[in-house]
Image (cartoon, rainbow, N blue to C red):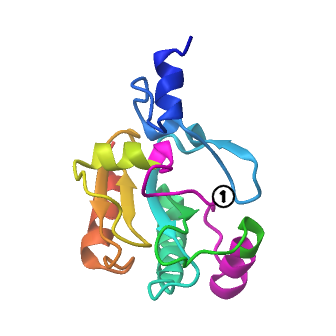
Amino acid sequence: MVTSLALLAMMNMPSPSVKSIYDFTMNDIDGKPVSLKKYKGKVLLVVNVASQCGLTPQYAGLQDLFKKYEKQGLVVLGFPANNFGGQEPGTNEEVKTFCTSKYNVSFPMFSKISVKGSDMAPVYKWLIEKSGDPKDIEWNFGKFLVLKDGSTVKRFAPRDVPSSKTLEEAIISALAEK
């Protein structure tokens, strides 16, 4: 007999008991499970990344944002995804090497996931649902700003570069919230 939670898991849907991003555990870029509770009380910028995309230089801006606001509580979380034009074909090890050698990425990177389609990772289904913007992820470098409560999500388009005034103001505002 299949339970309703098992059925949701098979359908790759978040459980109704998922109240915040902190209820997810994801594998880091080295394949080790990381409970997102680790980031409780932080402002998270969750980004689907790719290394062979015209937007790939955004890695530099994401790293700059992370370093600029890390001490105030911002954490950038990178999720490599190969959903758009095969622009992230590499293994997790290759992605890690690319990010660290080319862009000096020091923010947390996670194992490759799918951010679109029938195999979409449940955390991305949850992010889309909580953002109030039900459309699919448009392309690489889509961004979700998760506030300190872990359940409030604001969405930014792939072309909203990390240095954009709109994104930076949203981060500053989120960091200032109690």
Residue 3, how many percent across, how many down?
51, 14
Q: Quadrant of residue 14?
A: top left
Observer able to see residue 102: yes
**Left or right, residue 115 beside residue 164:** right
Residue 70, how many percent across, how many down?
53, 63
**Left or right, residue 171 beside residue 48:** left
Q: Nearer the viewer, residue 23 or 75?
A: 23
**Left or right, residue 15 beside residue 39:** left
- Find out whether residue 104 is within the magenta segment: yes
Residue 20, how many percent across, how many down?
42, 35
Quarter holding the N terminus is: top right
Q: Which residue is mark 1?
A: 111
Q: Amino acid at mark 1?
A: Ser
**Left or right, residue 153 beside residue 31:** left
Observer able to see residue 147: no
Residue at (43, 29) in percent of width and height: 18
Residue at (39, 42) in percent of width and height: 126
Considering the whole magenta stretch, tell me its main secondary structure: loop
Crowdedness near tag 1: few (<14), some (14–19) or many (≥20) residues, C-alpha within 10 Å: many
Q: Secondary structure at mark 1?
A: loop
The answer to whether 115 is drawn above or below residue 9 in the figure is below
Residue at (46, 73) in percent of width and height: 84
Magenta-highlighted residues: 95-123
Q: Residue furthest front?
A: 1
Q: Nearer the viewer, residue 169 or 120?
A: 120
- Find out whether residue 118 is within the magenta segment: yes
Residue at (70, 78) in percent of width and height: 100
Q: Residue furthest top?
A: 1
The answer to whether 51 is drawn above or below residue 178 in the figure is below
Quarter holding the C terminus is: top left
